[in-house]
Image (cartoon, rainbow, N blue to C red):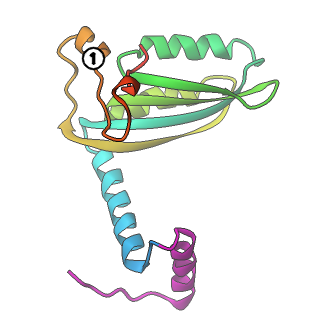
């Protein structure tokens, strides 16, 4: 379907700059569709009980008190929601972690807030997306959750993805 949008010229100029930044394959219509999808996903993530995946990126000074121990304790406490994490050394003192979470939207947000509020974490950001599966259903057994794996058609079978538990 087609529709038209009226907007001030300065806003349109900024929008066109965004379209240009997104690359040759993007045009105004594609970027509008992207923005609508993004808004709808954000809305879905706010639905109570909705199953989401979250990417929490944090930065911290690993010399700051016992921040590493606190982060490990939190991650072990919520091991059923934390799928995996990636730890990167940015310099001699600063580390970045990317924590992948899965679960009910409010719980994923709550765990992220606990981690972001940990003394020594200097900053971070949570991005959530829906899984499209509707309300969160906990795995029937911990073993089933821990043995989950799948293959992608573009990768060899030996590189299946396994969550870290």
Q: From what the image shows, is residue 95 above or below residue 31?
A: above
* Residue 132 image point, x, y percent: 23, 44
Q: Would residue 34 appear left or right of 149 to someone viewing this image? A: right
Instruction: Classify residue 139 by image quadrant.
Output: top left
- Tell me the crowding category of disc 1: few under 14, some 14 to 19, or many 20 or more residues within 10 angstroms, Cα based: some
Q: Nearer the viewer, residue 154 or 56?
A: 154
Q: From what the image shows, is residue 153 above or below residue 83?
A: below
- Assess whether residue 15 is covered by the magenta stretch: yes
| Residue name at image x 80 percent, y 24 percent | 93
Label 1 element class = helix
Residue at the far right: name it: 92
* Residue 84 image point, x, y percent: 46, 23
Q: Would residue 146 appear left or right of 21 to someone viewing this image? A: left
Q: Quadrant of the C terminus?
A: top left
- Assess whether residue 5 is covered by the magenta stretch: yes
Q: From what the image shows, is residue 44 above or below residue 125?
A: below
Q: Would residue 82 appear left or right of 65 to someone viewing this image? A: left
Magenta residues span 1-24
Q: Nearer the viewer, residue 47 or 163?
A: 163
Q: To which residue does mark 1 refer? A: 145
Residue 77: in sight, yes or no?
yes
Q: Would residue 57 appear left or right of 122 to someone viewing this image? A: left
């Amino acid at each position: 379907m087609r529709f038209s949008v009226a907007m001030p010229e300065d806003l349109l100029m900024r929008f066109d700059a965004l379209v240009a930044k997104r690359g040759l394959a993007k045009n105004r219509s594609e970027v509008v569709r992207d923005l609508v999808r993004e808004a709808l996903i954000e809305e879905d993530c706010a639905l109570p009980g909705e199953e989401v995946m979250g990417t929490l990126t944090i930065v911290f000074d690993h010399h700051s008190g016992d921040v590493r121990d606190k982060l490990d304790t939190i991650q072990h406490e919520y091991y059923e929601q934390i799928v995996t994490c990636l730890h990167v050394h940015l310099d001699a003192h600063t580390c970045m972690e990317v924590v992948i979470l899965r679960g009910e939207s409010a719980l994923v947000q709550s765990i992220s807030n606990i981690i972001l509020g940990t003394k020594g974490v200097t900053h971070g950001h949570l991005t959530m997306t829906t899984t499209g599966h509707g309300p969160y259903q906990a795995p029937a057994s911990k073993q089933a959750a821990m043995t989950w794996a799948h293959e992608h058609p573009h990768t060899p079978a030996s590189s299946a993805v396994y969550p870290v538990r």
